[in-house]
Structure formats: structure tokens, C-alpha cells
Image: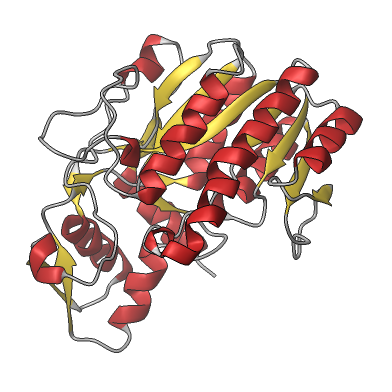
Amino acid sequence: MKVLVTGTSGQLGFDVMNELKKRGHEGIGADRHDSENADFEHIILDITDRDQVLKAVSDIKPDAIVHCAAWTNVDGAEEPENLAAVRAVNVDGTKNLADAAKSVDAKMVYISTDYVFNGEGETPWQPDQKDYAPLNVYGQSKLDGELAVANTLDKYFIVRIAWVFGQNGKNFIKTMLKVAETHDEVRVVDDQIGTPTYTIDLARLLVDMIETEKYGYYHATNEGGYISWADFTKEIYAQAGVNTKVIPVTTAEYGLSKAKRPYNSRLDKSKLKENGFEPLPTWQDAVKRFLANLN
């Protein structure tokens, strides 16, 4: 299978390329910049340039496109001067790829987020429920990207994830370990609830998906139960042997954030098993493997 993967300089895209290689598929990476230290075939591609996208996909003729590229700076998306850029990447860029996929009859995977929902309550969000109400600019742009895919293609997987961490790039675990180097205690939000997603585990699932025709909306985070960011930090420190004390605080007490954050990031993942996909391992196990491989 020939697969075009966008955003290969990021955490997830990088791991998807490695998973494709492991299974003997032909992966072509695509990013705005040259992928440093990449030992896979890649092209420079600006997904906001429609003509460039259509030509690249026409030339490559992939069997599937895994779209990992996105504007993910949630607070930065709230800045008025960034609004056009956020939509250009997350909405228009996604539509360009969906149109290109349709032109060559390729499957498409679109990576989305729990931010498409309103973040209230305690009931896990279902992959096929449609009562969207994004809290912020980023969430709205990802929802509009979902709709661009679903309204253009029949052969698509829309996969919502949350609390992402991987080896390639910045993430919460690396940040908290860095903080612990200079702080005896750290304040961490305790009223936002969800589950982390390890990109190596997610990459395996995404390749599982494109090897099938079980299209539709899915939720995919690691197993292991719903937790708060404070719970997550405590487990990170426990496994890493860090003595920094975690002080749980409310979102209001923490402050600092420009964008509204969801209190309820619980994603129901039962549809994965129902469609024969292997769920991701527990997040506790994922943290253990992440720390073992940390550079």
C-alpha cells in the first residue's frame, strides 16, 4: 500500500511513517519543512496551497492519505492575527487534501480532537454523536476540518484523540519532567478529565484502519481509565522517580490559559472493539514505554 502522510515532523506523523515502514508499506512523508533526520521518503508540501496539493497527490497516487498536519497551538489560535492561518491549515488545507484524495480514489484519515464537543458533563463523548459546540477557535477549526472530509469523501476515518504525547517533539510529559528539575512542587489542573494518547500506539491503530474499509468516526486514546492532568503528572513522576510534589488546583485557580479548555475530555472508544480493532494499551504502560525510550 502506498500512503501519503502529512505532518511528518510532528509527533504522530513521524510515528505513522515508522509504522508503515515496519509493515512493508510504502510511506511518503509530507511537511512544510524538510524533515530533519528522517530516514524515509518525504516531500515538502504546503497543504494550504491547493494547486500544490492536487499536483502532489496526482503524481504520487497514494492508496491512502493519513492527515496528521494541523495547527495545534490552542492558545495561539485565539490571537486575532492568527485566525486566518488557523483556518487555512485546519480547514482549507484539510479540504484540499480531501479533494485530492477523491481525485485519486484514496482513503483518508483525519486526526481530530475532543475539542469539537462542549467539554461539559461527565458522560463520555460518543464518536457518532453530532451535538458539537466547540469551546474555542482551535476546536471550531478542527470540527470544520471534520466536516470538510465527511462532506467530500465516502472512504474516510475521522479519529478523535486527546492529550497526545510522543517521542518526536514537545509534549506534556517532557514539559513536566523539565519543570521538576527546578521546582520542589508544581500546580496542576485537577478538574479537566480525559485519557492520554501515545503516538506510537495510535500510529499502530491508524495503519490497522487503513488496511480495512471500516470507515467512519472513531475515538482513540489509550486505555487505563479517565484521569485528571494532576493524576497524569503524579504517575509520570512516580514512574520517573521524581520527588516533586503535585498540588491539584482547579482550572480557575490555575488561570494562564487564553483559550477555554474542556472539563470533560472523556472519549468513548468502544466502537474500536465493535469494528474489530485492537484498543490501545493502558496509558500507564504507555508512560512506562515512553520514559524508557526518552532521549
Q: Give residue 244's quadrant in the image.
A: bottom left
**Compared to 95, does 211 lie above or below?**
above
Side of 124 where 132 appears, left or right: right
Q: Which of the image's four quarters has the C terminus?
A: bottom right
Q: Report the residue at 75% width, 15% height from top.
A: 105
Residue closest to the eye, 153 or 203: 153
Q: Residue at x 45, y 39 (%)?
A: 142
Seen in the image, is 66 located left or right of residue 131?
A: right
Q: Horizontal placement of 114 versus 50: left or right?
A: left
Residue 266 locus on image (x, y percent):
23, 36
Is residue 223 visible in the rendered structure shown here? yes
- Residue 171 screen position, x and y as percent: 43, 62
Q: Quadrant of the N terminus?
A: top right
Scheme of colours in the image = secondary structure
Residue at the farthest right position? 59
- Closest to the observer, 81 or 140: 81
User: So how many labels did they put on this image?
Assistant: 0
Q: Position of residue 155 (x, y in %)?
A: 61, 14
When asked about the image quadrant of residue 57, the answer is: top right
Residue 247 in sight here: no
Q: Is residue 102 depicted above or below 143 in this figure?
A: above
Residue 28 versus residue 220 in the image, above or below: below
Which residue is farthest bottom? 182
Residue 163 lies, in percent from the top left, at 35, 50
Q: Residue at x 39, y 57 (%)?
A: 74
